[in-house]
Amino acid sequence: MPAIVLVGAQWGDEGKGKATDLLGGKVDYVVRYQGGNNAGHTVVIGDKSYALHLLPSGILSPDVVPVIGNGVVIDPGVLLHEIEGLMARGVDCSRLLISANAHLIMPHHRALDKVSERYLGKARIGTTGRGIGPAYGDKIARMGVRIQDLFDPGILQKKVELSLREKNQVLTKVYNRRPMLVEPIVEEYLAYGERLRPYVANTELIVNQALDAGKVVLLEGAQGTLLDVDHGTYPFVTSSSPTAGGACAGSGVGPTKVTGVIGILKAYTTRVGSGPFPTELLDDMGEYLRTTGGEYGVTTGRDRRCGWFDAVIARYAARVNGVTDFFLTKLDVLSGLEEIPICVAYDVEGVRHDEMPSNQTDFHHAKPVLEILPGWREDITGAKTFDDLPPNAQAYVRRLEELSGARISAIGVGPGRDQTLTLRDLI
């Protein structure tokens, strides 16, 4: 049976939580494969809204096994708070599985993230300050602390001592901060380990055995393609690989078991943090999209930068991820506009680019080449089929499909669980 990858096809915040929830009745496992609590998904069920940060969206589907894979970096205090918050609202979290190989965000990671970002000033990247980048840095430097280390006090003590030997030098001598003490950190994290112990498992083995047994596994990424550390708008990216290729490394599922890639596209474009954004609107229309679309970060609350749909980015995402189907979200936000521009190419100092420029400098100077489509005034939030959409809304969707490099198989016309038009089965 298939492993399906769900990826953001823009800069994140495309509505992956809604897509995962929609597929909840068709999948058996949902595996979060990268990122940390620097990302969030919002899932609306009836009149209830759930903001998820570390937990996979499948936690809200009672028949799904939610898994936090080895590619995720975990702040254990944040994770436990999130679990307790859901349990207080009646959500069963007992099915949750956490990879023993997942790395931990430590107090010194958070401290370094915050002070280094302030130190960069105007050159800052726009991180959330939650320690994700430094945690991934230690992982690659082979100095990281993993979930499994919480169950070996001696190993945990040695790893924290080794890490602080270097990190305290940086904190005190570069940033003029107080040094961190080993013992309080070890004591705090050993306590976290006891509370997390019931959830920890060999998830890589369990997920592969599930696939061999005919189960359907959804591999869920955080952030989006343009924030990928290799394929994104570097250096204004995250510290992991949200693309479909990262799903295999972050879950332990081999690439030959992946049978489909669902890319999530918003009907316009947003991004959070610093970095180039060719279609960004810095006028009243940008504020209209932000307000109407509720474009504020689930995790940070930060205003999202808003702009028109960028088909160049969509084509890039389709190619980099091998997208088989697109899920288009927030089409309803565009209702009421007389005209809706689409970016079909870039102009870089008089040269047209139909594909992503090969270097960052050109992308930074890219100006959108716009195609104007007529809008629609009708309220589409009650639509049940594609034919229920106004003709201009249908034409808009068809044009996006033509430009984006893969078929659009589902359309979100509102935040609710039942406000999705399914054109083709995604699984």
Image (tube, rainbow, N blue to C red):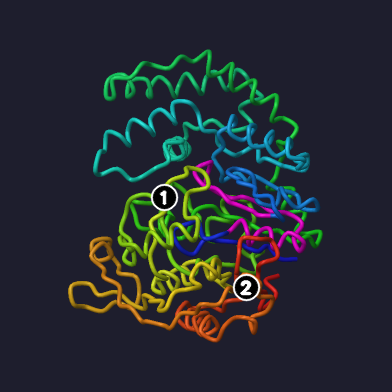
Question: Where does the image place residue 10, in percent across and percent down from the top left?
Answer: 45, 63
Which residue occupies 64% across, 25% down?
Answer: 192
Q: Quadrant of residue 120?
A: top left
> Nearest the camera: 116 or 142?
116
Looking at the image, is mark 1 or mark 2 nearer the viewer?
Answer: 1
Q: Residue, x 33% and y 19% (percent of image)?
A: 177
For label 2, the residue is 410
Q: Amino acid at mark 2?
A: Ala
In the rendering, which numbered label is found on residue 28? none
Q: Residue at x 27, y 33 (%)?
A: 119
Which labelled disc corresponds to residue 303? 1
For label 2, the SS is: strand
The question of residue 22 being in magenta is answered with yes
Would you say the residues marked 1 and 2 are in contact, meaning their CB atoms lie under 8 Å apart?
Answer: no
Q: Is residue 184 above or below residue 132?
A: above
Write the start and end of the magenta stretch as one range: 16-44
Q: Secondary structure at mark 1?
A: loop
Q: Earlier in the sequence, mark 1 or mark 2?
A: 1
What amino acid is found at the position of numbered circle 1 in the picture?
Asp
* Relative depth, front residue between 128 and 392: 392
Report the front residue among 12 and 216.
12
Give the quadrant of the C terminus: bottom right
For the residues marked 1 and 2, what is the alpha-carbon distance in whole angstroms? 27 Å
- Label 2 Cα crowd, 10 Å radius (few <14 / some 14-19 / many 20+): many
